[in-house]
Amino acid sequence: MVKIAPSILAADFTSLKEDIVSVENAGADMIHVDVMDGHFVPNITIGPLIVEASRRSTSLPLDVHLMIEQPEAFIPAFVQAGADMVTVHAETCPHLHRTIHLIKEQGAQAGVAINPHTPIEGLKHVLEDIDLVLLMTVNPGFGGQSFIHGVLEKISSVEKMAADVNKNLWIEVDGGIDQETAALCKQAGANLLVAGSYVFKHDDRREAIERLRG
Ligand code: DX5
Ligand code: ZN
């Protein structure tokens, strides 16, 4: 069954704990945390301090998405702050295999994210080492952008790549996910859906999560 991870990027940070608790009570499976550094992406968001505050707000797993350069320098701090899953962008990691193992040594599940234009082929060489592949369905940096349909074929290809080697893998999609695009992603093979605006801007968050789950 598909899992739903609301992104707190779309939450109200004056009442972050209430917003996290509200999506937990509405049936969310994980909390997605978007970390941006103003270098890899044209926006700055949050650091380990907010991850630690989120950790104290919920018992749900924290799915931390690092959109930062040189993530190795910060991985221990994010895991210590309470990240259960840490995802780095392949585009920021010249020594991706080493970075993945750093995440695992710290005690978190390891994920690799790729931008919409990045080919999936490189993932094959680290597939056995990772727990999660995150396929960006927008250009990372902001919430509320439109879904890029061209990524759908990459979802199917990653699913096939994993099935070919009998690998149990989270196939996560992130950006522009609503009821309609969620259905397309699930059909293509995604099993973990991130949604920011669609969940947090919805009056009835339980209904929003149920619609994404389908
Ligand atoms: C984009 C972030 C996404 C974003 C999704 O760079 O990685 O997680 O918060 O927001 P929506 O669902 O509003 O597109
Ligand atoms: Zn994200």
Image (cartoon, rainbow, N blue to C red):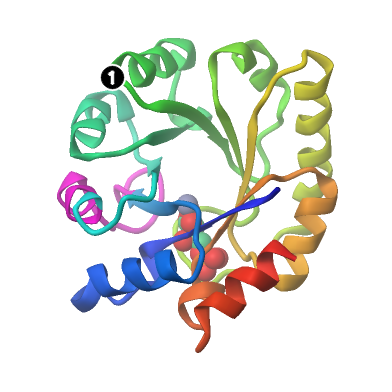
Q: Is residue 129 above or below residue 82?
A: above
122 sits left or right of 75 in the view = right
Question: Looking at this view, is 98 or 184 the one in front?
Answer: 184
The magenta span reads: 36-54
User: In the rendered image, is residue 146 in sight?
Assistant: no
Front residue of 136 and 8: 8
- Which quadrant of the view contains residue 84? top left
Which residue in the protein does label 1 denote?
106
Q: Give the camera-side residue of 186 and 112.
A: 186
Please identify the quarter of the rendering in which residue 101 is found.
top left
Image vertical order of residue 198 relative to residue 52, above or below: below
User: Dot 1: few (<14), some (14–19), or many (≥20) neighbours within 10 Å?
Assistant: some
Which quadrant: the C terminus? bottom right
x and y percentages locating residue 20 in the rendered image: 33, 66
- Total labels drawn: 1
Residue at position x 79%, y 62% from top? 183
Q: Residue 16: where, in percent of width, then height? A: 25, 70
